[in-house]
Image (spheres, rainbow, N blue to C red):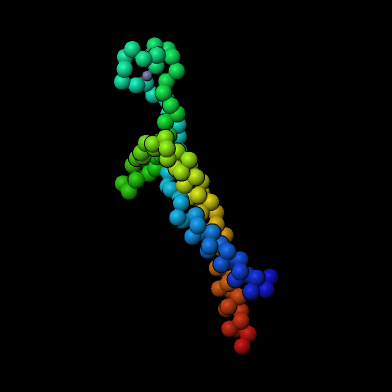
Amino acid sequence: MSSIRHSTKRVARLRELDRLGRRMLFGTVSETYRTCGQPACACHHGGPKHGPHLQVSYRGDAGKTTGYHVPQVLADTVREGVAAWQRFQEVARTLAELNREHAWRRHAKRSAR
Ligand SMILES: [Zn+2]
């Protein structure tokens, strides 16, 4: 690979990280179904429970699992945000490898002089 093409690849990855970084959210999404506060509601008498309610959980600073409920209106944003986090990890890994190749290439150029 020429070093120009190599550098184009790195720039493309950096742009993708920038895009993903603006949307990404940390955590794992799960769906829960719950009973409501009305004892007469069907959900308390064998009927379907309310949901799905989106929940995001993640490991907090103290190593303890924590999380938050997601309002329905933000469900898509949160799902996309969590997917963006996963993709961010993959792209960062690829970029790290390109950076390593770049460093070796520069080293080889200097040594050749
Ligand atoms: Zn109910």
Q: Nearer the viewer, residue 104 or 82?
A: 82
Residue at far right of view: 1
Residue at far bottom of view: 113
The image quadrant where one finds the C terminus is bottom right
The image quadrant where one finds the N terminus is bottom right
Name the residue at 57% across, 78% down: 107
Task: Give the image quadrant in which the ligand numbered 1 is located.
Answer: top left
Q: Left or right: where does residue 11 sit relative to residue 48?
A: right
Q: Position of residue 106 (x, y in %)?
A: 58, 78
Q: Is residue 106 above or below residue 45?
A: below
Q: Position of residue 15 (x, y in %)?
A: 53, 62
Name the residue at 32% across, 48% down: 61
Q: Nearer the viewer, residue 7 or 97?
A: 7
Q: Position of residue 110 (x, y in %)?
A: 58, 83
Q: Is residue 48 above or below residue 51?
A: above
Q: Is residue 57 visible?
A: yes
Q: Left or right: where does residue 101 sit relative to residue 72?
A: right
